[in-house]
Amino acid sequence: MKRRWAKLMREILQHFAEVPLEAVPDGTLLLTEGELSGRVYALAEGQLEVLRGDTRVAILDEPGSIVGEMSVLLVAPHTATVRALGDAKVHAVENAPAFFESRPELSWLLAQLLARRLNAGTTYLVDLKRQFAGYGNHLEMVGEVLESLMHQQERHFYPGSDREPGID
């Protein structure tokens, strides 16, 4: 499984070979949560930190890791902030919609990447549902809430809560 993941990431990175490399110093913000930039970055070297609010969601260190693609595909603001964690090198695409459109073969690789992410989320959802089944209180609803979010089909969906004002 890990080999297949590494192979997928290498194949994705190959599609960015003609995109100039940019050196980004430690702490550089690449994407800002809530903004619509139209940019995508592919990691070549180093680490990128992904944050939702003040919460670290992930540290990306695999060359070929892409950030910004969800915003581009959904034509929606970025759902997370991404910054360099230490010095890094990235391929920066300013007009990601045109970049993706000119490389239809990249669509299959992105579909695989997004399917893996969805599978990880679904696996986590099943685990949560098992953990909280039978509690008979609000914890039992965690699975139902997450399941409804995973299968949300509305055109404009922006998750939020009373703790996150400003998200409609």
Image (cartoon, rainbow, N blue to C red):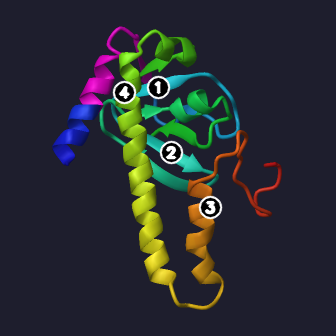
Q: Residue 32: where, in percent of width, then height?
A: 63, 36
Report how far apart the C-alphas of labels 1 and 2 lie in the structure: 13 Å
The disc at residue 148 is 3
Q: Earlier in the sequence, mark 1 or mark 3?
A: 1
Q: Which mark is residue 108?
A: 4
Name the secondary structure under disc 1: strand
As helix, strand or loop, the secondary structure at mark 3 comes to: helix
Distance Cα–Cα, label 4 vs label 3: 27 Å
Question: Are the two marked residues, 2 and 3, in contact with CB atoms closer than 8 angstroms?
Answer: no
> Is label 2 in a helix, a strand or a loop?
strand
Task: Mark 2 vs mark 3: give the one in front.
Answer: 3
The answer to whether residue 16 is magenta is: yes
Residue kind at label 4, given as amino acid type: Trp
Give the labeled residue for mark 1: 41
**Front label number (1 vs 3):** 3
Image location of residue 13, percent across then percent down:
31, 23
3 sits left or right of 13 in the view: left
Q: Residue 160, how many percent across, how many down?
A: 73, 55
Q: CA distance from mark 1 to mark 4?
A: 18 Å
Q: Earlier in the sequence, mark 2 or mark 4?
A: 2
SS under mark 4: helix
Q: Tell me which label, 1 or 4, sits earlier in the chain.
A: 1
Amino acid at dot 2: Val
Magenta extent: 9-23
